[in-house]
Amino acid sequence: MSFEKLSPIENMVPRGNLHTPENQETDIEKEAMDDLNDLGLSWDYLKEKLTLDIGAGPAIITETAKKKGVKVISLDKNPEMWTERDAKLPSTLYVKASAEQLPFQDGVFDLIISHAGPV
Protein backbone atom coordinates (compact mmCIF):
# COMPACT_ATOMS: atom_id res chain seq x y z
CA MET A 1 0.00 0.00 0.00
CA SER A 2 1.29 3.42 -0.89
CA PHE A 3 1.03 6.19 1.69
CA GLU A 4 0.89 8.75 -1.11
CA LYS A 5 -2.83 8.01 -1.40
CA LEU A 6 -3.34 9.33 2.13
CA SER A 7 -1.75 12.71 1.56
CA PRO A 8 -5.04 14.60 0.89
CA ILE A 9 -6.37 13.36 4.24
CA GLU A 10 -3.23 14.61 5.92
CA ASN A 11 -4.29 18.18 5.10
CA MET A 12 -7.52 17.69 7.04
CA VAL A 13 -5.77 16.87 10.32
CA PRO A 14 -5.54 19.95 12.58
CA ARG A 15 -2.05 21.09 13.48
CA GLY A 16 -0.82 22.48 16.76
CA ASN A 17 -1.95 22.01 20.34
CA LEU A 18 -5.67 21.35 20.48
CA HIS A 19 -5.69 21.59 24.27
CA THR A 20 -4.86 25.25 24.70
CA PRO A 21 -6.64 27.15 27.50
CA GLU A 22 -8.70 28.99 24.87
CA ASN A 23 -9.89 25.72 23.32
CA GLN A 24 -10.60 24.28 26.76
CA GLU A 25 -12.79 27.27 27.63
CA THR A 26 -14.66 27.00 24.33
CA ASP A 27 -15.21 23.26 24.82
CA ILE A 28 -16.47 23.77 28.37
CA GLU A 29 -18.76 26.61 27.30
CA LYS A 30 -20.20 24.37 24.58
CA GLU A 31 -20.63 21.47 27.02
CA ALA A 32 -22.41 23.77 29.48
CA MET A 33 -24.75 25.00 26.75
CA ASP A 34 -25.44 21.42 25.62
CA ASP A 35 -26.19 20.37 29.21
CA LEU A 36 -28.60 23.28 29.66
CA ASN A 37 -30.32 22.44 26.37
CA ASP A 38 -30.67 18.79 27.45
CA LEU A 39 -32.51 20.02 30.54
CA GLY A 40 -34.70 22.40 28.54
CA LEU A 41 -32.94 25.40 30.07
CA SER A 42 -31.16 28.39 28.58
CA TRP A 43 -28.81 31.11 29.80
CA ASP A 44 -31.68 33.59 29.36
CA TYR A 45 -33.91 31.54 31.68
CA LEU A 46 -31.15 31.46 34.30
CA LYS A 47 -30.54 35.21 34.28
CA GLU A 48 -31.04 36.60 37.76
CA LYS A 49 -31.22 33.06 39.18
CA LEU A 50 -28.72 31.89 41.78
CA THR A 51 -26.39 29.10 40.60
CA LEU A 52 -23.73 27.13 42.46
CA ASP A 53 -20.69 25.97 40.47
CA ILE A 54 -19.40 22.92 42.39
CA GLY A 55 -15.81 21.87 41.81
CA ALA A 56 -15.26 25.12 39.99
CA GLY A 57 -11.52 24.69 39.52
CA PRO A 58 -10.39 27.62 37.36
CA ALA A 59 -14.02 28.86 37.28
CA ILE A 60 -14.48 28.63 33.52
CA ILE A 61 -18.16 27.70 33.87
CA THR A 62 -18.58 30.47 36.46
CA GLU A 63 -17.09 32.96 34.02
CA THR A 64 -19.32 31.74 31.19
CA ALA A 65 -22.46 31.93 33.34
CA LYS A 66 -21.58 35.42 34.61
CA LYS A 67 -21.07 36.63 31.04
CA LYS A 68 -24.60 35.41 30.36
CA GLY A 69 -26.03 37.34 33.32
CA VAL A 70 -26.36 34.43 35.76
CA LYS A 71 -25.61 34.98 39.46
CA VAL A 72 -22.98 32.39 40.40
CA ILE A 73 -21.21 31.26 43.54
CA SER A 74 -18.04 29.34 42.76
CA LEU A 75 -17.19 26.46 45.14
CA ASP A 76 -14.05 24.33 45.26
CA LYS A 77 -12.09 22.64 48.02
CA ASN A 78 -8.80 23.58 46.28
CA PRO A 79 -9.22 27.19 45.12
CA GLU A 80 -5.59 27.82 44.13
CA MET A 81 -6.58 28.52 40.52
CA TRP A 82 -9.01 31.30 41.42
CA THR A 83 -6.34 33.96 41.69
CA GLU A 84 -6.09 34.54 37.95
CA ARG A 85 -9.87 34.35 37.47
CA ASP A 86 -10.50 36.74 40.35
CA ALA A 87 -9.03 39.56 38.30
CA LYS A 88 -11.60 38.86 35.57
CA LEU A 89 -14.52 38.23 37.94
CA PRO A 90 -14.03 40.51 40.95
CA SER A 91 -17.70 40.36 41.97
CA THR A 92 -17.79 36.55 42.14
CA LEU A 93 -18.18 34.91 45.53
CA TYR A 94 -15.66 32.10 45.92
CA VAL A 95 -16.27 29.52 48.64
CA LYS A 96 -13.68 27.00 49.81
CA ALA A 97 -15.65 23.88 50.70
CA SER A 98 -16.24 20.28 49.74
CA ALA A 99 -19.18 19.22 47.58
CA GLU A 100 -19.94 16.56 50.21
CA GLN A 101 -20.37 19.19 52.94
CA LEU A 102 -21.97 22.24 51.40
CA PRO A 103 -22.08 25.28 53.70
CA PHE A 104 -25.51 26.35 52.41
CA GLN A 105 -29.09 25.69 53.43
CA ASP A 106 -31.22 23.45 51.22
CA GLY A 107 -33.13 25.22 48.48
CA VAL A 108 -30.87 28.28 48.27
CA PHE A 109 -29.86 27.69 44.63
CA ASP A 110 -31.97 27.58 41.50
CA LEU A 111 -29.37 25.39 39.77
CA ILE A 112 -26.23 23.51 40.80
CA ILE A 113 -23.66 22.86 38.09
CA SER A 114 -20.30 21.16 37.81
CA HIS A 115 -17.74 20.72 35.04
CA ALA A 116 -19.37 17.37 34.29
CA GLY A 117 -22.76 19.06 33.85
CA PRO A 118 -25.78 19.83 36.03
CA VAL A 119 -26.03 17.77 39.21
Image: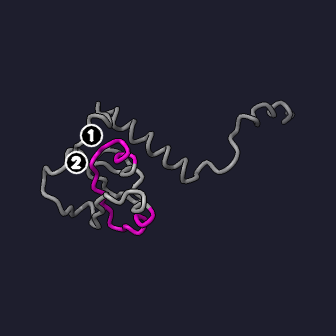
Q: Which mark is residue 50?
A: 2
Residue 73: image location, x then y, percent: 27, 55
Which corner quadrant of the image does residue 68 belong to? top left
Give the magenta range. 64-84
Height in image: 81 above or below 25?
below
Q: How many marks?
A: 2
Name the image quarter holding residue 85.
bottom left
**Residue visible at 30% across and 34% down in the picture:** 44
Asked whether 95 falls inside the magenta stretch, the response is: no
Label 2 environment density (alpha carbons within 10 Å; few <14, some 14–19, many ≥20): some
Side of 14 where 91 appears, left or right: left
Q: CA distance from mark 2 to mark 1?
A: 8 Å
Q: Residues within 10 Å of mark 1 (few under 14, many from 20)?
A: some
Under circle 1, the secondary element is loop
Name the disc covering residue 47, or none.
1
- Residue 103 place in picture, x, y as percent: 18, 63
Disc 2 residue type (three-letter): Leu
Q: Residue at x 31, y 53 (%)?
A: 53
Residue 1 position in % (x across, y down): 85, 33
Tell me where residue 49 appears, x and y as whole percent: 22, 43
